[in-house]
Structure formats: C-alpha cells, structure tokens
Image (cartoon, coloured by chain):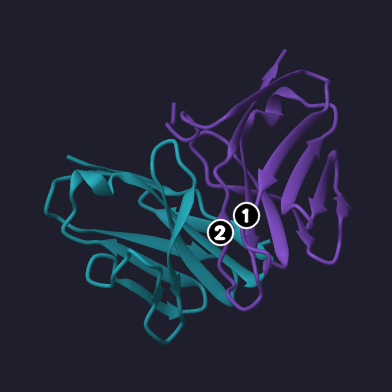
Chain colours: A purple, B cyan
C-alpha cells in the first residue's frame, strides 16, 4: 500500500458511529477552509468548504464547524462507514493568496 | 468540478536525471498549482503555475530545480531536475476556478535511486 498517512495521528471508530476530526489553523487572515479526503494511492478529494463568515456548514453526512475565536475547524461524519477510512486534511486559504496551506492530517480507521 | 489527470502515474528514476510530469485539466481553469507530499506527511505547495508568465515559487523551491510551464488554461508541466533520493515523493497538481475551489489530480509517485 501507499505510505501516505503512516506517521499521522489516527482516529479509530466503529462502523455506524459518528466521527469528529479536528484541525487547528494558523492564519487569522484565512477566509476559507476546505476539508479533503485522501485514500491510499489517490489524490486528495474535495469534501466540503466553509467561508470565514460562517460557523457551520452541512453536506451529505458531513458537517464542518468553524470557531474563529480559537482558530479551530472540525469535520463531523455521521454514521461512519468503512469507505470513510482515509486520511483527512484541512486546508486554509485567503482570497489574496489563492493557494492552500494544508494541516498535518488525521487518519480515520473505521472498524467493522 | 474539474477532472485532472497526471502523467506518469509513477516512475523510478536514477540520481542526476530529470523527470517531467504533465497535468491535464478537462476544462479551462484560472488557477493551477503544484504540491509535493513526502511519505507520511501533508502537502506542501511548490509553486503556482501562471498562464503565460513565470511560475510563482514558495520559499525553499527554486525554478532551476523545479521548472514549470503553463502554456494554456488546461495544461501544465513540472520538471524535477537533477534528482536525488530526497526528491522521492508524490507530486500533485491541483486546479480550480475560485479561491475556495481546488481539485487534485491522482498524483505522480516518484522514486529516485
């Protein structure tokens, strides 16, 4: 298998449980945030984004929460499935820069 | 969302040689970027590929080592020059239309012996 995520913190959950993946970001000027999912051997896959003028955004089975006061971002996955097993990265950016700065990532392992 | 392909998907190269990685997007995009992901680590931005002008490099990355071309709005190349084992990594292309909209290719897995 691929080596991506070997040294990353790991969150292990039971199938059907809810998962919460956390991320601390560094730049108070960041005005948008994106969560990516990276499966072994693949590039990062866009999951959901949120603008800094929001504190919550929901997608299909996923919710992103943003706390600008403490520069914290979380991704909640409802009813976690084996197919959710992957490495999850948060990324931040600001309009003037356009490129993204990635967090260190978390490996999610879903136990059947 | 844009669909992004990269070639080659993987390669094993000898020290001192160069490899050019291609990134093709299925639609015209404003922005294209190149990232590196070393084993077990997160993504690090190498440079922004600017259409019709020189790429914008991040601190620690230089044009002589990582020359980039972007001849049009759907295509870019990254060359890894004079390779050493420390260049072994996954190289990723991303593209998008908006600041909060970036999609990634599958990556190129490079091993330098």
Task: Output the chain of dot 2.
Answer: A
Q: Secondary structure at mark 2?
A: strand
Q: Quadrant of residue A95?
A: bottom right
- Drawn side of residue B68 relative to residue B30, left or right: left
- The numbered mark 1 sits on a residue in which chain? A
Judge by depth and name the residue closer to the eye, A68 or A74.
A68
Which of the numbered marks, if any, corresponds to residue A101? 2
Task: Judge whether A84 appears above or below B76 on screen.
Answer: above
Residue A28 left/right relative to A102: right
Q: Which quarter of the rendered picture does the C terminus of chain B lie within?
A: top left
| Label located before the other in sequence (1 or 2) | 1
Q: Quadrant of the N terminus of chain B?
A: bottom right
Dots 1 and 2 on the same chain:
yes
Does residue A59 appear left or right of residue A84 in this picture? right
Residue at 67%, 69% (x, y): give it. Answer: A29
Residue ID for mark 1? A91
Residue in view at x 85 percent, y 27 percent: A79
For residue B2, say whether it is visible: no
Task: Check the image and report above or below for A7 versus A112.
Answer: below
Which one is nearer the viewer's eye here, A102 or A16? A102
Indicate the position of residue A74 as horizontal and vertical percent values: 76, 43
Residue found at the far front of this picture = A69
Q: Name above or below for residue B1 compared with residue B8.
A: below
Q: Residues within 10 Å of mark 2 (few under 14, many from 20)?
A: many
Q: Judge from the rendering whether residue A52 lies leftward or rightward of residue B12; answer left or right.
A: right
Residue closest to the eye, B85 or A7: A7
Considering the numbered disc 1 on the image, is that residue within a helix, a strand or a loop? strand
Q: How packed is label 1: few (under 14 Cα within 10 Å), some, or many (20 or more)?
A: many
Disc 1 to disc 2, how far (Cα)? Answer: 5 Å
The residue at the point 62 percent across, 79 percent down is: A96
């Amino acid at each position: 298998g691929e080596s991506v995520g070997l040294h990353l913190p790991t969150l292990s959950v039971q199938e059907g449980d809810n998962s919460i993946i956390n991320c601390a970001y560094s730049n108070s000027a960041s005005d948008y945030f994106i969560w990516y999912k990276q499966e072994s051997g693949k590039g990062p896959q866009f999951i959901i984004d949120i603008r800094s003028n929001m504190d919550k955004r929901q997608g299909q089975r996923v919710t992103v929460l943003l706390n600008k006061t403490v520069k914290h971002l979380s991704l909640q996955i409802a009813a976690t499935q084996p197919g959710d097993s992957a490495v999850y990265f948060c990324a931040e950016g600001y309009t003037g820069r356009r490129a993204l700065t990635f967090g260190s990532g978390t490996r999610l392992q879903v136990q059947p | 969302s844009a669909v992004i392909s990269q070639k080659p998907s993987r390669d094993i190269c000898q020290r001192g040689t160069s490899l050019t990685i291609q990134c093709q997007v299925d639609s015209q995009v404003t922005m294209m970027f190149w990232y590196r992901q070393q084993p077990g680590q997160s993504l690090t931005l190498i440079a922004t590929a600017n259409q019709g002008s020189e790429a914008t490099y991040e601190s620690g990355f230089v044009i002589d080592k990582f020359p980039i071309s972007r001849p049009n709005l759907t295509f870019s190349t990254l060359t890894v020059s004079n390779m050493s084992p420390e260049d072994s990594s996954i190289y990723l292309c991303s593209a998008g239309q908006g600041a909060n909209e970036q999609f990634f290719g599958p990556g190129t897995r490079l091993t330098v012996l």
